[in-house]
Image (cartoon, grey):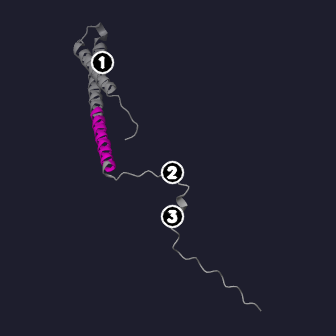
Amino acid sequence: MGDIRVDEDQLSSIVRHLRAGSSSLDDVAEKLPEAVNAGFSSDVANAALARVGQIAIALAQQGQAMASNVNTAEGQYQAAEDEHRHKVETTDEVDKRRRAEAPPQLEEAPPDEQDYKNRPKPTTETAPAPTPPPKP
């Protein structure tokens, strides 16, 4: 997982606002008058009111769908974070166990000025010197 961060409180706030807006639109659709008497324009006015009601209901449904999608995304984010946290914890536990089981590493001592005396002499033979050319 990268460095992506999601504010879960913000997601919850978005869900609440979408649902509140959907509820308000439902109220608008329910409270519209069934018909108005606008004289010779009554048919046009009633058609417009019916259309406003249809639009309000459609928007309320879309708001509820978006709220559900955001809610689902929040759940998926939380699941991904939990899985990532588990993997990190498991990796950390494995690393700690390996360090605990590993033999302790020895620190190197500072170089000793007399150290060359304690080192064994090389056991490999050196190549013989080249034979000089014969003298005339």
Disc nearest the viewer among 1 and 3: 3
Instruction: Look at 28% across and 11% down and name the residue there.
Output: 42
Looking at the rendered structure, the kind of residue marked 3 is Arg
Q: Which residues are drawn in magenta? A: 74-99
Describe the element under mark 3 as helix, strand or loop.
loop
Q: Quadrant of the N terminus?
A: top left
Estimate the x, y position of residue 85 in percent, counting from the top left.
Answer: 30, 39
Marks 1/3: CA–CA distance:
98 Å
Q: Which mark is residue 132?
A: none
Instruction: Look at 29% across and 34% down and name the residue there.
Output: 78
Estimate the x, y position of residue 40 in percent, counting from the top left.
Answer: 30, 9
Q: Which residue is mark 1?
A: 52
Marks 1/2: CA–CA distance:
87 Å
Q: Which residue is mark 2?
A: 110
Q: Does residue 53 appear in the picture of this structure?
A: no
Query: Callout 3 environment at 10 Å: few (<14), some (14 to 19), or many (20+)?
Result: few
- Please determine whether, in this image, residue 100 is positioned above or below residue 127: above
Q: Name the one closer to the observer, 96 or 57.
A: 96
Q: Name the one closer to the observer, 115 or 4.
A: 115
Whichever of callouts 1 and 3 sits on the residue coming sooner in the sequence is 1
Query: Callout 1 environment at 10 Å: few (<14), some (14 to 19), or many (20+)?
Result: some
Marks 3/2: CA–CA distance:
16 Å
Instruction: Look at 53% across and 75% down and name the residue there.
Output: 124
